[in-house]
Amino acid sequence: MDKFIIQKSSLKGEVKISGSKNAALPVMAATLLTDGQCVIKNVPDLSDIRTMVKILECLGKEIKFEENTLIVKKSSKKLNPGFIAPYRLVRTMRASFCCLGPLLAKRKKAKVALPGGCVIGPRPVDLHLKGLSQLGAKVSIENGYCVAGGKDLKGCHLYLGGQFGSSVLATANVLMAATLIEGKTVIEHAACEPEIEMLALFLKSMGADIEGEATPLITVRGQKSLSGTTFEVIPDRIEAATFIAAALATKSSITLTGVNLKHLTAVIDVVKMIGGQVIETNGACRVNVPSKLSPVNITTFSYPGFPTDLQAQFMVALSLASGISLITEKIYPDRFMHVAELNRMGASIQRSGPYAIIEGKEALFGAEVMASDLRASAALVIAGLAALGKTEVLRVYHIDRGYEKIEEKFSKLGAKIKREKQ
């Protein structure tokens, strides 16, 4: 198990943003819909990606992964039974549950382990099951697995809204299943995230008939089969905004390349209110940060709102703002595991239900802190870069799930950060 040793740093220079993990994983699952070869470019080399590779191999795919390119084709090995995604792999990564829809549509049966608990709060799969059931699948929970089957699946008009709005992975599961199901499927209250739009474009490149991607109403007309394709993954908007948050917290100006600012409008709006600037120039963007940060109120929402996946990182920056800020977590009300660790570093954050009240301080101070989840890990790294003294971030295997060589990227920006064995 590794840890990061971090000293207070000022950042400068240029960093290239990797492909999106949250976009790549459903696209990888979608390869189960075809026996043809799929070439997927700009795939980040992350532990979650490697886990999905193992799951697909269990499900009958042969995969080559080199230089951020995945080549996925049907394996020559005969698998028995070939429709089970085992718990030993699924438990490490929630996104693997989106193998359910493709397996059901292509192989008419699926057995996928339930993802289990999560430190950021309850993340039920009820919308997944509701959507697939309305398509005619017989779905049951047996011994910790979701078992689905159905030979007479039919398209339908279904509503996919939940307690906290739309669901990205449930939308992905139903969307993928509908591409091979007879008839027309209309998904109302579909997720509008760029990752869903990209999944739809990937499916269309395979021959799927889809309309309305990037809107709350997606229409799918089922096809008899889908073909292989070549496709490129979009830039990771969460990674890009994590570096923006780091620039704010360290009061540094940096340049990001390989980023799509159209996916970051809510984030850019918050940056402006804090007092910073995000300026697009020649396919890159320059982040300029003032010496004094203004407090702001942030509420997380489904896209195009402010992402819940950036709540922790921006909380660090607001801990160093001149005044009191408020963060309201509308997606995962319990997603505040990082608050206690930031307070140990000198932050003044009070949590009440889905609210976090942040009183800005002059400085944070280095400490030994424990990463609890992927985005909290990134927040603690940012806090370490902004804090006086030495910070040790333990359990960085969390951050390796979603950030490609993050310590190397920060080092190129001048950060004092190194990885050591814990």
Image: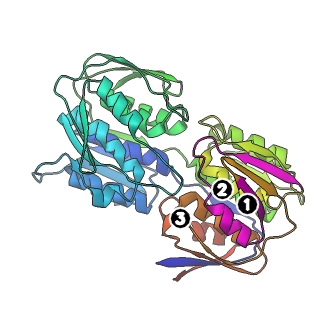
Q: Is residue 199 left or right of residue 235?
A: left
Q: Secondary structure at mark 3?
A: helix
Query: Pointers 2 and 1 in contact (CB under 8 A)?
Result: yes
Is residue 179 among the parts visible in the rendering?
Answer: no
Q: Which residues are magenta?
A: 323-351
Q: Is residue 335 magenta?
A: yes
Q: Earlier in the sequence, mark 1 or mark 3?
A: 1
Q: Which residue is mark 1?
A: 316
Q: Which residue is mark 3?
A: 399
Q: Amino acid at mark 3?
A: Ile
Q: Is residue 385 left or right of residue 83?
A: right
Image x and y of residue 64, in percent: 30, 57
Q: Residue at x 26, y 33 (%)?
A: 227
Q: Is residue 247 left or right of residue 34?
A: right
Instruction: Classify 10 Å Cα crowding around label 2: few (below 14), some (14-19), many (20 and above).
Output: many
Rounded to the nearest angstrom, the CA distance separating label 2 from label 1 is: 7 Å
Q: Which residue is mark 2?
A: 312
Q: Is residue 327 magenta?
A: yes
Q: Secondary structure at mark 2?
A: helix
Residue 94 versus residue 420: which sits nearer the camera? Answer: 94
Image x and y of residue 317, in percent: 76, 58
Residue 71 versus residue 339: which sits nearer the camera? Answer: 339
Q: Residue at x 47, y 44 (%)?
A: 23
Q: Secondary structure at mark 1?
A: helix
Instruction: Point out the residue furthest to the front here.
Output: 352
Image x and y of residue 32, in percent: 26, 41
